[in-house]
Image (spheres, helix red, strand yellow):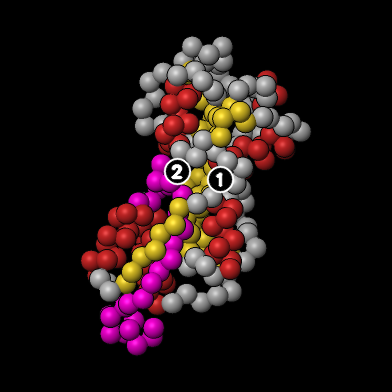
């Protein structure tokens, strides 16, 4: 690795975990990989998309070199986290919903809504569940959707309500966004790398490029 890095002849395999692109506001993984491949064509990428909690564990175990994920806290055992983006989530409802047009809502007033959200290990789901727990409440997710665009369409057509990061919503037509007054969930994304394990030269170089894109915006 050291010799290759000096000679510019990086090679090997880099194993990357990532969330859906819709959730990864603030960074384009495709753009990072394309730029890196142009400079280092002998490096192979293996990209795995999955749940944030699962990917965090795979980085700790060494089965992923690093991952782009969402976690409820900037501190995670065994991981070094570099922030990508942070958003306060809002309640998304159909434009004709009884709450549309409200200045804000309390979680206690919406605990009985019909909710769509990701599976239990999804970053958005974890953030919202933690917010309800902090308020001493528990909601029920009736529709588990592992696709952000489908979830948004459910809201748009009045099938369910959902807590959304505003950046998810590219086309707001038909959807009202209502801020949460207290205990608002926060969706925070990070690049996670191992704290106690040294990355190979190719993985370290790719990670540095990704971090540079975050810093440059």
Q: Quadrant of the N terminus?
A: bottom left
Which quadrant of the view contains residue 98?
Answer: top right
Q: Is residue 20 above or below residue 129?
A: below
Instruction: Give left or right: position of 50 versus 210.
Output: right
Q: Within 10 angstroms of label 2, few (less than 14), some, or many (20 or more) residues?
A: many
- Residue sitting nearer the eye, 47 or 36: 47
Residue in view at x 43 percent, y 46 percent: 20
Q: Which residue is mark 1?
A: 123
* Circles 1 and 2 in contact, beta carbons < 8 Å: yes
Q: Residue furthest left?
A: 38
Residue in view at x 63 percent, y 58 percent: 75
Q: Mark 1 to mark 2: distance in Å?
A: 9 Å
Residue 23's tag is 2
Instruction: Give left or right: position of 186 versus 149.
Output: right
Q: Within 10 angstroms of label 1, few (less than 14), some, or many (20 or more) residues?
A: many
Instruction: Give left or right: position of 126 versus 148.
Output: right
Q: Is residue 168 above or below residue 49?
A: above
Query: Bounds of the magenta span?
Result: 1-28
Asked which secondary structure carries label 1, the reply is: helix
- Pinpoint residue 4: horizontal percent, then vertical percent: 33, 84
Q: Is residue 216 something that shows in the picture? A: no
Which quadrant of the view contains residue 9?
Answer: bottom left
Whether 9 is among the magenta residues is yes
Query: Which badge, 1 or 2, is on the more N-terminal residue?
Result: 2
- Pinpoint residue 52: horizontal percent, then vertical percent: 54, 51
């Amino acid at each position: 690795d050291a010799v290759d890095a000096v000679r510019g002849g990086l090679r090997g395999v880099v194993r990357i975990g990532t969330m859906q692109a819709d959730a990864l506001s603030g960074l384009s993984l495709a753009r990072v990989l394309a730029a890196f491949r142009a400079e280092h064509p002998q490096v192979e990428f293996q990209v795995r998309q999955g749940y944030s909690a699962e990917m965090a564990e795979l980085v700790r175990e060494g089965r992923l070199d690093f991952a782009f994920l969402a976690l409820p806290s900037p501190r995670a055992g065994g991981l070094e986290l570099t922030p990508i983006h942070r958003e306060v989530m809002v309640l998304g409802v159909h434009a004709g919903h009884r709450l549309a047009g409200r200045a804000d809502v309390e979680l206690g007033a919406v605990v009985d809504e019909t909710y769509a959200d990701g599976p239990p290990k999804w970053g958005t789901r974890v953030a919202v569940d933690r917010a309800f727990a902090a308020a001493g409440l528990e909601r029920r997710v009736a529709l588990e959707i592992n696709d952000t665009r489908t979830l948004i369409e459910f809201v748009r057509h009045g099938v369910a309500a959902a807590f959304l990061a505003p950046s998810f919503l590219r086309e707001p037509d038909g959807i009202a966004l209502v801020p949460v007054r207290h205990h608002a969930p926060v969706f925070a994304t990070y690049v996670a790398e191992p704290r106690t394990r040294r990355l190979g030269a190719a993985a370290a170089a790719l990670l540095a490029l990704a971090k540079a894109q975050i810093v440059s915006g």
